[in-house]
Image (cartoon, helix red, strand yellow):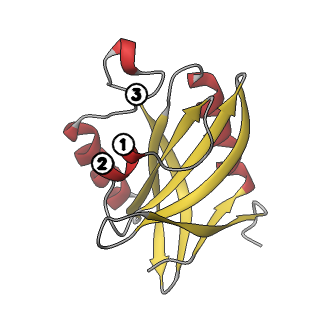
Amino acid sequence: MAHRVKLSAALQAQIIAQMEAAFPNEGGGFLLGDASGETVEIRDVIGVENTSAPQERYHRYAMTPLDWARMEDEAEELGLTLVGYYHSHPHSPAIPSEYDRDHALPNFTYIITSVMQAKAADLRAWRLRADRSAFDPVDLQITADNGV
């Protein structure tokens, strides 16, 4: 189980820019990287269009099964693994919702960005427990763009 997630400042900036651009709706995408021991290192992020019904996009984020398959293929081509997923919570804290828990998968890293008034206010990492009962916070380490 991952207890630490490493994310470069450049990838953090990409996530923030995507989530602010999606405001007032939820935005999201995939985290590609490597898992080693208790550490997940994010090496790429790829935004994916929100396919929720237009009237639900302000508080729901969804993607198609084809998006999942395409991302798994892209990760493999890059020599990476699909290690998680990120999305925003407009006008809400960066804490997983009940909806998030119902639709999450164990063993994935989840990064949630709180966006208030079109500006990112908080960014946190989470992991769903194996029994799906709750999310646990994960230590999110923002690294310099050279990996340090």
Q: Crowdedness of circle 1 by 10 Å Cα count: few (<14), some, many (20+)?
A: few
Spatial CA distance of label 2 from label 1 is 6 Å
Picture coordinates of residue 44, whole percent (x, y): 53, 53
Which of marks 3 and 1 precedes in the sequence?
3
CB of mark 1 within 8 Å of CB of mark 3?
no
Q: Which residue is mark 3?
A: 49
Q: Which residue is mark 2?
A: 103
Q: Amino acid at mark 2?
A: His
Picture coordinates of residue 56, whole percent (x, y): 38, 20
Spatial CA distance of label 3 from label 2 is 17 Å
- For the N terminus, the quadrant is bottom left
Q: Amino acid at mark 1?
A: Tyr
The correct choice, above or below, for 40 with respect to 77 in the image is below
CB of mark 2 within 8 Å of CB of mark 1?
yes
SS label for mark 3:
loop
* Residue at 34% in and 65% down: 133
Picture coordinates of residue 121, whole percent (x, y): 74, 39
Badge number at residue 99: 1
